[in-house]
Image (tube, grey):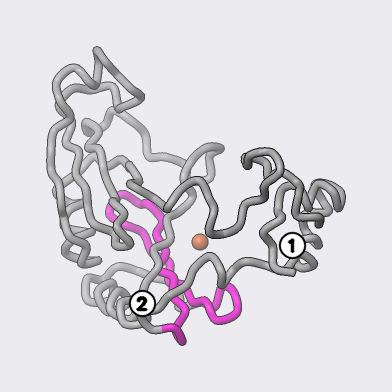
Amino acid sequence: MDGQSAGPAGPAGTTRTKDDVPTRGVHHLALTTEDMKATVEFYVGVLGMKLVHAMKVPEGVGTVDNRGNPPWERLRHYFFDMGGDSLYAFFEIPKGERPQTDRDAIGGMQHVAFACSAERFQDIQDRLKAHGVPADGPIEILPGIWSVYFHDNNDIRLEACCKLDEGDAQGVVDSVTQTRAEAAEELLTLGDEDWIDMVAPNLKP
Ligand SMILES: [Fe+2]
């Protein structure tokens, strides 16, 4: 790697590092439910998130000035604090108007994984158990990284993810960033060495 290759979205002559990415993180996820009350009770009552905003989508946005929103008027649209200064939101779709999604469909959302401190990781497992929500795990998904998998009231697949030995100081990106040699084992199935240098100059040496 010569350090001069332009990243795929970087300005010419520069490379991106992990501290120079175009986004800070998730502002909000917007999911769908057909039962907002049960959804509030799951995320607040079972997981312990905080409900921070409850609204109906303003008149006209659904069917007149639609920006990609669900095509109905005055839908409930609620937001929860999922930590890390990020929001977790739902639209309430009218009952029976849409089928249950296939989480493996192309362009769909397979699952959401929440980063948790070690204390919260245990708390979530205790809460799931107390509410009779089935869960798989903890499973060590990568060295030192443990996950518990479960489903919300909408059958959305969720994951709580934790580095048990890091307490409150959970790192995410650095803990999974591979060395160039590790990533190359897979990336060479898609392109050559020059292509790897172009798309992944940020890998560890
Ligand atoms: Fe995952």
Q: Nearer the viewer, residue 35 or 12?
A: 12
Percent across and percent down for residue 178 are 68, 67
Write the start and end of the magenta stretch as one range: 139-166
Query: Which residue, given by chain and number where applicable, does mark 1 sit on?
Result: 183
Query: Which residue, given by chain and number where applicable, does mark 2 sit on?
Result: 117
**Magenta part mainly helix, strand or loop?**
strand
Q: N-terminal of the two: label 1 or label 2? A: 2
Disc 2, SS: loop
Question: Residue 103 lies in magenta, yes or no?
Answer: no
Residue type (three-letter) at the residue carrying disc 1: Ala
145 vs 37, left or right, is right
Residue type (three-letter) at the residue carrying disc 2: Ser
**Quadrant of res 58:** top left
Percent across and percent down for residue 205 are 75, 69
Give neighbour class at mark 2: few <14, some 14-19, many 20+ (Cα, 10 Å): many
Q: How many marks?
A: 2
Residue, x 31% and y 57% (percent of image)?
A: 152
Give neighbour class at mark 1: few <14, some 14-19, many 20+ (Cα, 10 Å): some
- Residue 196: assigned label: none
